Image (cartoon, helix red, strand yellow):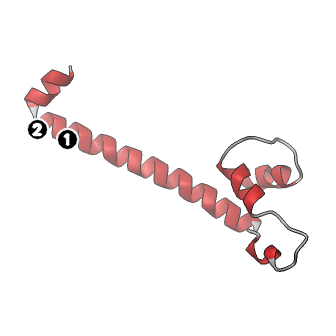
Amino acid sequence: MLDSVISRRRNGQDFQQDFLESLIMKHSRKSDAQEDENKLTDKQLKDNVLTLLVAGHDTTTAALTWLIKFLEENQNVLEQLR
């Protein structure tokens, strides 16, 4: 799925203002061959997007788990929150 999204975005279709679009714009081919060395491959773009998704998911899940644990241990804080 990401491969087809990246391909469409590189071809100028389905423009959106998001993380993937900023990576494509920043690391797109330039006319100068020296700057072309900084171009991200499709695989690198996909890795960046997946890293962002996994990191965002895991940190949110961990934060909610710790929140519930500490609220259970601190009934007066839980009561104030309610």
Image side of residue 59 versus residue 65, left or right: right
Decide: is 54 above or below 70: below
Q: Which residue is mark 2?
A: 73
Image side of residue 67 versus residue 52, left or right: left
- Quadrant in which the C terminus is drawn: top left
Identify residue type, mark 2: Glu
Q: Residue at x 71, y 67 (%)?
A: 43
Density class for disc 1 (Cα within 10 Å; few <14, some 14-19, many ≥20) is few
Residue 49 percent across, percent down from the top left = 62, 55
Q: Residue at x 65, y 50 (%)?
A: 19
Give the alpha-carbon distance from disc 2 to disc 1, as whole Å.
6 Å
| Mark sitting on residue 40 | none
Residue 69 percent across, percent down from the top left = 19, 41
Number of marks present in the image shown:
2
Q: Residue at x 82, y 74 (%)?
A: 36
Q: Residue at x 73, y 50 (%)?
A: 21
Q: Which residue is at the far top?
A: 82
Choose top left, top right, bottom left or bottom right for residue 24.
bottom right
Choose top left, top right, bottom left or bottom right for residue 13.
top right
Identify residue type, mark 1: Lys
User: What is the secondary structure assignment of the residue under circle 1?
Assistant: helix
Residue 76 percent across, percent down from the top left = 8, 27
Residue 60 percent across, percent down from the top left = 40, 44
Instruction: Tell me whether circle 2 and circle 1 mark residues in contact (CB < 8 Å).
Output: yes
Image side of residue 49 versus residue 73, left or right: right
In terms of depth relative to the viewer, which is nearer, 34 or 66? 34
Decide: is 40 above or below 63: below
| Mark sitting on residue 69 | 1
User: What is the secondary structure assignment of the residue under circle 2?
Assistant: helix
Choose top left, top right, bottom left or bottom right for residue 72.
top left
Q: Which residue is at the far bottom?
A: 34
Density class for disc 2 (Cα within 10 Å; few <14, some 14-19, many ≥20) is few
